[in-house]
Amino acid sequence: MSISAPLSSGISAEAVRRRLHGQRFDLPGIVVHVALLLSLLFSLVVLGVLVYDLVSGGWDVFASRFASFLSGTMRFAASESGIAQALRGTLWIGVFVVALAFPFGIGAAVYLEEYAPDNRLTRVIDINIRNLAGVPSIVYGILGFAVFVKTLSGLTGGRSVIAGGITLAILVLPVVIITAAEAIRAVPDDLRQGGYGLGATRWEVTRTQVLPYAAPGILTGTVLSLARALGEAAPLILVGAVVGRLGSNPGLFDIGSLDQRFTALPIVITYWAGLPQPDFRALTAAAIVVVLAIVLAANAAAILMRNRYESKRG
Amino acid sequence: MRSAQRRSARLLALPLALLLLTAACGNDSDSAGTGTEEPGATGGGGATSGTINISGSSTVLPVSQLVAEAYADAGNQANVNVDGPGTGDGFQLFCEGETDISDASRPIKAEEIATCEQNGIEFVELRIAIDGLSIISNTSFDALECLNFADMYALSGPESQGFDNWTDAQAIAGELGSQTQFPDLPLDISAPGEESGTYDSYVELVIETYNEDRGQEAQTRPDYQSSGDDNIILQGIQGSPSSYGWVGYAYFVENEGQVKAFQVASEPGGECVAPTPETIASGDYPISRPLFIYVNAEKAESNAALAPFVDFYLSEEGISAVAQAGYVDIPEADLEETRSTWDSRTTGANFASE
């Protein structure tokens, strides 16, 4: 006889579940459910309030003078001030992070995971990279000042966006290495074994199996670290980003002036937020919205690319 | 399979290509960087192009910023950068020869002069404006209108640590000869932190009147809400109906109506003076301080852009920035003295400060 016979005689699945739980009302389960939901709501509400506060605070600026806000320079009068110089600095910092931290970080991760032997030395290196990721950003600022502003001033031009960009690239390097290494570690070993079984070399396996599979994870980590670099202010202050007035306003892609003094969006935001004139508060909010938009765009690009890789993988 | 291969190759190739590109750019800009000053000087508007780096007091920053803006708007090509890390940090850079002009909200100190001398840096000291400190409280605080230096020492000096009611300071104020009756209200202090020039001025002008005689260090009590951000100080002052604090006069003017400024007497029984442009310029208001720019004398010769800029700074048009930035003009006679100091490039410090 099958066990379905008693069930058919009027005992519902719900009744069975109740019986299994000792007919008790599942209080702990409901509490956990509600608590988890509240955690999510809390994060969303905080984020929502923040975004609403910023957008409403900066709305006047966007509505009345969007173009001149984007093309203007740092000036005494709030009504004439803009973020052109800061945008330029932030853009170039992003370029340096992409050009330096990404290839070196991913390269180091591939080496650590695919090539390096698993011995005491590599484990020590691994732990140290993790520690580096937790070092306060101001420490990287001191490093940047000592090495790129002072020692290598011939190469970087001293207090320049080159020095700032390299400093921030080094700042996020450990994060890039860690996230890339995690992504590579998550690649099923079967894939590698299959490759080796077909006679592929280690580089061929890495290139054709491991990296394509790990690409979505690597992308997510690298873009998150790019977002972090774009939002950093403390190291840039040490490296000598100008807080006040920047005399030059070269074009966005004027490579020749990369070794001149510079500023960046987080620096301008910090500066404006501390100014006494109330009008600068709207500018501060507007500048933060611009930073958020840039970071959001970077994240969106990463998600799009990740989805492409994931669909390829599937 | 092949497309995945190509794609992953591209994944690696993109950052690598960018790396090469920027490496190439780095070299480019390096050679261009060393060259920019030369072609600029010959190709631009004669002696006016070049770069001028100004750093120092965040109090003086708006003045130098406004002058630089007016200078650029007048069609001069010079590239004037103005930074404001603070007077002390500014002098450090200045005495290492990193900046052309140092903004200062106090005269240069002896130890800073020594550093400058060690590095062979001579400077021209130019007084450009006067700043007053405003002693502030909540607008609803009406128990007192006037405070003297003894009251201020009793409320915020080194001996006041732990005082959280105005009456706690009564005994010390009395010992110093003050007749002021403090109200029985909480004492909530919001003021600039030690890194600020405004803090230095407060200690120098108010606290140092009494601390040595009483065997105390020249500092304020450590236990108050300190911030380098004037807006946060303002919030603290507005947050308590019986608050106490101090900010630069310019900042008080920006926010007039939102906080109350006390009248100030320099000694118990002295005349109470409210901070106004007139009383500050005349020196009647007891807590005011001169603002300076220090010009690197050697760079005034070697940097062709610098001398014309300082000329402009001290001209009628340039110096009007002082009022625009919310500070008080120095009297005409003093301004003439500043100009002649500059014209003769007289080096050295004339305003004593230990």
Image (tube, coloured by chain):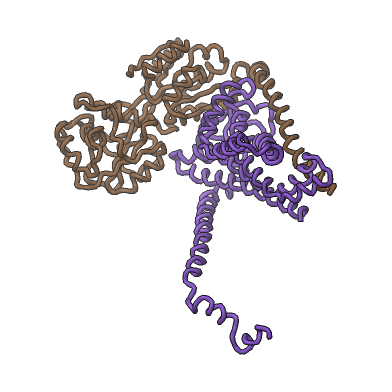
> Residue B110 sits in which quadrant?
top left
Chain letter tied to purple? A
Instruction: Answer with left or right where residue A259 lies relative to residue B117.
Output: right
Image coords of residue A25 (percent x, y)? 48, 76
Image coords of residue A219 (percent x, y)? 68, 46
> Residue B23 sits in which quadrant?
top right
> Residue B245 sits in which quadrant?
top left
Determine the residue positioned at 59% across, 32% down: A167
In this rendering, the answer to whether A181 lies above or below A17 is above
Task: Pick whichever, A169 or B144, lies toward us.
Answer: A169
Task: Pick whichever, A63 or A163, lies toward us.
Answer: A163
Image coords of residue B205 (percent x, y)? 29, 27
Image coords of residue A252 (percent x, y)? 67, 35
Determine the residue positioned at 23% across, 27% down: B216
Task: Pick whichever, B15 or A231, lies toward us.
Answer: B15
In this rendering, the answer to whether A150 lies above or below A78 is above
Please tell me how many numbered marks the rendered image carries.
0
Determine the residue positioned at 77% across, 38% down: B13
Rendered hue of chain B is: brown
Instruction: Answer with left or right where residue A25 lies relative to residue B255.
Output: right
Residue B313 shows in this picture: yes
Task: Pick whichever, B250 or B174, lies toward us.
Answer: B174
In this rendering, the answer to whether A305 lies above or below B133 is below
Determine the residue positioned at 51% across, 50% down: A57
